[in-house]
Image (tube, helix red, strand yellow):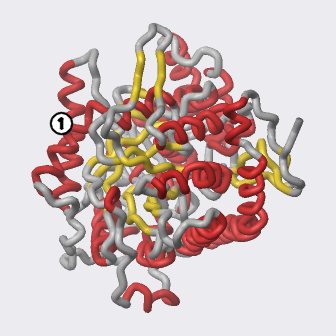
Amino acid sequence: MNNTPVGVNAPLPANAQQAAILSQDALYFLSQLHRKFEPQRQALLAARAERQVRLNAGELPDFLADTADIRAAKWTIAPLPADLLDRRVEITGPVERKMMINALNSGARCFMADFEDSNTPTWQNQIEGQLNVIDAYRKTLSYTSPEGREYRLDERTATLILRPRGWHLDEKHVTVDGEIMSGSLFDFGLAAFHNLKYQLEHGSSCYFYLPKMESHLEARLWNDVFTFTESFLGAPHGVIKATVLIETILAAFEMDEILYELKDHSAGLNAGRWDYIFSCIKKFRSREGFCLADRSQISMTTPFMRAYSLLLLKTCHKRGAPAIGGMSAYIPVKSDPAANEKALAQVKSDKERDAGDGYDGGWVAHPGLVPIAQAAWDAVLGEAPNQIGKQRDDVVVKAAHLLDFQPEAPITEAGLRSNISVGVQYLAAWLSGLGCVPINNLMEDAATAEISRSQIWQWLRSDKGVLDDGRKVNTALFSALLPDEVSKIRAAGRFPATLDEAARLFDQLTTSSDFVEFLTLPGYARLA
């Protein structure tokens, strides 16, 4: 029997656990979120498209004149809860049971459980992820491998922070009044409905990471969602806390305003570096003269990335908010001691730079990297929980610094081939249900795959898309290299069931005259 509320259509639960997740009360709450906030979500997505038209016509972003008073005023975010004061190491990963246990037990202070870029949003993954989150909060999460090995949570675990999908993504399996529901509201709504009261009763709350925002108005919408949820569930105002990922070039110009909009609910900002690079390519893809070098040449020390990183740090500490550093994509390499040494050295350098700059913590993608990151922050923090008191008044970042897109060269055949290989392999993994995958000793997720395909799209169309040997990156060259790289992937035995479909999709995304905003949009249409 289907007990869904009037106007709500959702798949019938497959078992008693799913029935508990998709209870009538839970679905009613989701329907209230949709009816109250969907019109504004759609208006904000339309505003994104309108802004892109202006950027294509030559407009450049700048700090907003009509919010100058917010930037000039003295204010801080609301006080942080005890379990978000010390975030010196945060580990991230999908909402998969075994990975969650390993991450929660890793020794990191926080764990970002990801419904977004490192998760393929099949219906099964989303629902099982919600079940896993419930068990994680209640410390009952366990897993037995096919070989019989048992995994259970330690007595002390990382603080759990959830990342729902971004505003642009839908949850196609659920409709309200005939309209497809927001993936953001679906992921957030189920997590808050089933866990907020429990967490408050046990001395904590529900914490979130908010991805892909492009303006402070999008942050305002989240703040309204939080306020409504607290009222609906009978929770005190301000107990939900959220850290915003600054991973779009447009949001970098509105960091003060984003913190201000979420002031009562804010837990700071995070430098989402890989999506940030993708955003720069996407937003300025049609701008004459814009072109970025091979992905491997773009680091946190390149001019536009350094400016963004320091501005985020300065802005957060000025407002009493944590500044969390982004992800180094390197992971341990057990099979190659020399490569492993190089990878660990890269992570060490990355974390020591962020800690030295004044960041309050940083991300890692693998439990084996927690001690390296921990050592970097222990060296500057000692027993202190954070560096929020370290003001960076010496940092002066103007719009021109954020738009100083260097380096433009080199663009190499190796870089082009790498983009093809990474993009196809990631799509093949994603289509098979894996949202993050190690490729060439790096942990790749949707953000890094987005860089790969958007760079090729832009190189094909830019006068500056020329290899260091003088060849223009054009459709003929791309079409010659694509099957070669696919053959190498096939020979390695990777993702045979979805490889051909992934190659076709990557080809379409790259050669289509229209730029697809996110590769996960056409990808999602192919998922069950």
Going by the numbered disc 1, the residue's amino acid type is Ala
User: Camera-side residue: 517 or 4?
Assistant: 4
Q: In which quadrant is the C terminus drawn?
A: top right
Check the image and report above or below for 489 versus 99: above
Name the side, left or right, on which 91 lies relative to 86: right
In the rendered image, residue 222, in percent from the top left (x then y), is placed at 58, 67
Query: Is 287 rendered above or below residue 5?
Result: below
Residue 401 visible from this viewpoint? no
Residue 312, image quadrant: bottom left
The N terminus, quarter of image: top right
On the image, the x and y values in percent for residue 108 come to 29, 42
Q: To which residue does mark 1 refer?
A: 345
Of 447 and 374, the residue lying toward us: 374
- Residue 201 in percent (x, y) is at 48, 55
Towards the viewer: 473 or 425: 425
* Closer to the camera in the image, 185 or 467: 185
Classed neighbour count for the residue bearing mark 1: other residues with Cα under 10 Å, few (<14), some (14–19), many (≥20): few
**Residue 139 in sight here:** yes
In this picture, residue 189 sits left or right of residue 418: right
Residue at figure coordinates x 72%, y 57% from the top left: 29
Circle 1: element type: helix
